[in-house]
Image: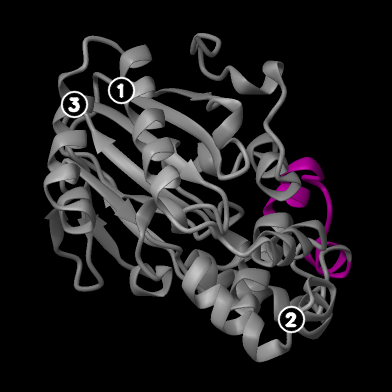
Amino acid sequence: MRYREDRVRPALSSRVECLWLAEDAAAAPGASERILPDGCIEWIFHLGAAYARIGDDGHPSLQPGSFVVGPMSRPISIAPTGPVRTLGVRFRPGGAGETLGVPLETLADAAASAEELWGAAGRRIEDAVGNAPNDAVRRTVIEDFIESRLARSRAADPRLASAVGEVLAGRGRRPVADVARRAGWGRRQLERAFRAGVGVTPKTLSRVIRFQNLLRVAGRASGASWADLAARCGYADQSHLVRDFRELAGVTPASREAASGELGRHFVAPERLEALLSGRARSDDAFVQDGGRPPA
């Protein structure tokens, strides 16, 4: 699989981590891939064969051509159905509300098609991206659409971005009461703001971010014991780490691989998690992967 990430224009970079493209012309229906929660919202365009979402009952359902995946609190399984060419817009935690225009808690552990979110405008953007002559035009179409949505939307309360930044900077370890106090909110105000503007509670986001930081640290220190990783990443003990790992990855740490499949592994690469946790764009060297070309 070829995978690359491109930066967005500066006006959008505080809200959008990147645009990414995954390509595999040889992909055929086969084994499922496990995608892990990371606090982000993804807007997906299937330019090739769509992936199928594997339900809890094991039955697949074909994903729409363009849809938004809300913030997750548990892993999901997907499987290719043919040659892959999938484009994604990865919103930073708390960065999608003004673009989507709905309370984000309605998308928690759920997905909605572009048409369900934006009606006729959703159909138009899906067609425009699908029919664009090249990826540079696709990127322009998507960025223009997001900017137009932002121009017509009510500005988010800056305290929300501040609070999300506290969760990220603390790697999910800061008590919710401290996050609220630093943002200038009461705890209940913080909870309401997170449900509407992030899609999950501060406690859930903190738990997810702590887990992603664990994956980042484990990826950089392959020889470390789980007990050591638990202490370094803010878990009460190893059993606490194992419990969270099982619930957020669907497997135990003994598997040594939280995400499965090429796409899932790209999403938890240590350099990608550095970008998630820092809130900054990745370096040019880290931005080019698997033979992909530099950002246009």
Amino acid bearing label 2: Trp
Q: Which residues are magenta?
A: 215-231
For mark 1, what is the residue?
A: 24
> Who comes first in sequence, dot 3 or dot 1?
1
- Label 1, label 2: how far apart the Cα atoms are: 47 Å
Amino acid bearing label 3: Ala
Label of residue 128 in the image: 3
- Label 3, label 1: how far apart the Cα atoms are: 22 Å
Residue 234 coordinates in the image, percent (x, y):
83, 71
Q: In the visual, does 94 lie left or right of 116?
A: right
* Residue 83 showing in the rendered view: no
Depth check: 130 or 30 in front? 130
How packed mark 1 is, by other alpha carbons closer than 10 Å (few <14, some 14-19, many 20 or more), is some
How packed mark 3 is, by other alpha carbons closer than 10 Å (few <14, some 14-19, many 20 or more), is some
Q: Secondary structure at mark 2?
A: loop
Write the residue at 60% across / 83% down: 191
Q: Mark 3 or mark 1, which is nearer to you?
A: 3
Q: In the visual, does 254 lie left or right of 47?
A: right
Q: Mark 1 or mark 2, which is nearer to you?
A: 2
Q: Secondary structure at mark 3?
A: helix
For mark 2, what is the residue?
A: 185
Residue 195 coordinates in the image, percent (x, y):
50, 77
- Label 3, label 2: how far apart the Cα atoms are: 41 Å
> Who comes first in sequence, dot 3 or dot 2?
3
Say whether residue 225 is magenta: yes
Amino acid bearing label 1: Asp
From this view, report whether residue 136 is shown above or below residue 257. Answer: above
Write the residue at 40% across / 50% down: 99
From this view, report whether residue 218 is shown above or below residue 158. Answer: above
Label 3 with label 1: CB-CB less than 8 Å: no
Say whether residue 123 is magenta: no
